[in-house]
Image: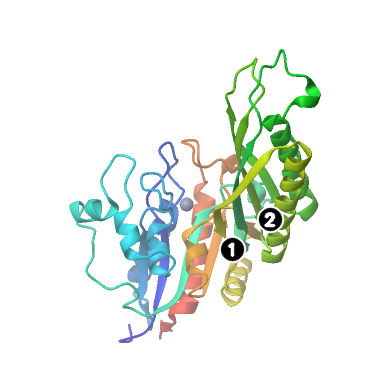
Amino acid sequence: VEPGAAQVLVGSHLDTQPNGGRFDGAYGVLAGLEIVRTLDDRGIRTRRPLTIVSWSNEEGARFPLATTGSSVFSGQLSLEDALAQRAVDGPTFGAELARLRAAGGEEVGARPVCCYLEVHIEQGPLLEASGSAIGIVTRSQGLHAVEVVLTGSALHAGTTPMELRRDALVGAARIVELVSELGRAAGGLGTVGHLLVEPNSRSVIPGSVRLVVDLRHPDVAALDTMAARARDGIEAIARDARLEVELDTLLRVDPVAFDEEGNRVLAEAAARLDLASLELVSGAVHDAVKLAPVVPATLTFVPCRGGVSHNPGEYASPEHVRAGCDVLLQAALARAEVVP
Ligand SMILES: [Zn+2]
């Protein structure tokens, strides 16, 4: 290794969901380990150092700030906020890092980075359906989540004439329909997955509804258009139903593009190894999504059975696991530069 040379990072995360499987995350970290062991077995030396990374708290299952490690590393979350976040069972992230002796002393960003390579199970059905062993992720979609609170009048369902009602759930139902239509029309995704109806009683007209609109699209302009149309449409529905409405952005994640040159190397490696590959957009957030704005980053997928993930039934075949490692090894060698 050449002194001072920028490092090639290979990794993913080891944390999982409470009822998660064995592959989500762990596969990418073990792939890094397998690559380094393979180079050692073959006595191959590289000009740039290869570094295996296991990012902390990617899932956000125990601590609320998902992708904690990669967000701090890429400057999208302050170290203070990361350390201060509290686990669902009480202690702070900082206290747990200290207790586990996992709190390193090195300053974030102290070592120069050449690129980041991550391999992950797809967590969706597209690769399996296409028969491809390798997914090359070109972009990740952006996300815009808006909380909507509709307020009407909670009156007696048996005595209030229809024309006098201000039924918040009737407004909410129209919003659910609108959001679904917006997703379809924009070639994106629109979901209302959370509704809280008050007082939620058979004989009372719903007086208020809290719902969350979740919009996703790989193109930032299209995502902004969807969000603007949703806002206008929701306000029009509220006016029409004589409801008060409050809108509040809960979460906004911009789409990112992965490294084109890196993806070209991956596609060539797959072709050389006789593995069918497919270009994909990542629907989920991964550590690579956090790294992509600050270093050349690639995200490679392998198929998982039935697209099942975040479930103990999660499974990827040994052939596919090996295919992902093989392609990643080639990409790592191209970036780290073999010393003859
Ligand atoms: Zn993951």
Q: Position of residue 115 (x, y in %)?
A: 46, 75
- Look at the numbered disc 1 and give the secondary structure of its residue: loop
Choose between 5 and 211: the one closer to the eye. Answer: 211
Q: Which mark is residue 254?
A: 1
Q: Which mark is residue 234?
A: none
- Vertical arrangement, residue 258 with respect to residue 209, above or below: below
Choose between 167 and 255: the one closer to the eye. Answer: 167
Dividing the picture into quarters, in which one does residue 170 lie? Answer: top right
Number of dots carrying numbers? 2
* Residue 74 relative to residue 3: left or right: right
Q: Position of residue 18 (x, y in %)?
A: 40, 38
Q: Is mark 2 within 8 Å of ligand 1?
A: no
Residue at 69% x, 64% y is 219
Check the picture and name the quadrant holding the N terminus.
Answer: bottom left
Q: Position of residue 278 (x, y in %)?
A: 67, 60
Callout 2 amino acid: Ala
Residue at 43% x, 49% y is 59
- Look at the numbered disc 2 and give the secondary structure of its residue: helix
- Packing grade of label 2 (10 A; few <14, some 14-19, many >=20) is many
Callout 1 amino acid: Asp
Q: Position of residue 5 (x, y in %)?
A: 36, 85
Dividing the picture into quarters, in which one does residue 8 lie? Answer: bottom left
Q: Which residue is mark 2?
A: 227
Q: Earlier in the sequence, mark 2 or mark 1?
A: 2
Choose between 89 and 271: the one closer to the eye. Answer: 89
Residue 33 visible in rendering: no
* Residue 141 relative to residue 100: left or right: right
- The Cα atoms of the two marked residues, 2 and 1, are separated by 13 Å
Residue 152 visible in rendering: yes
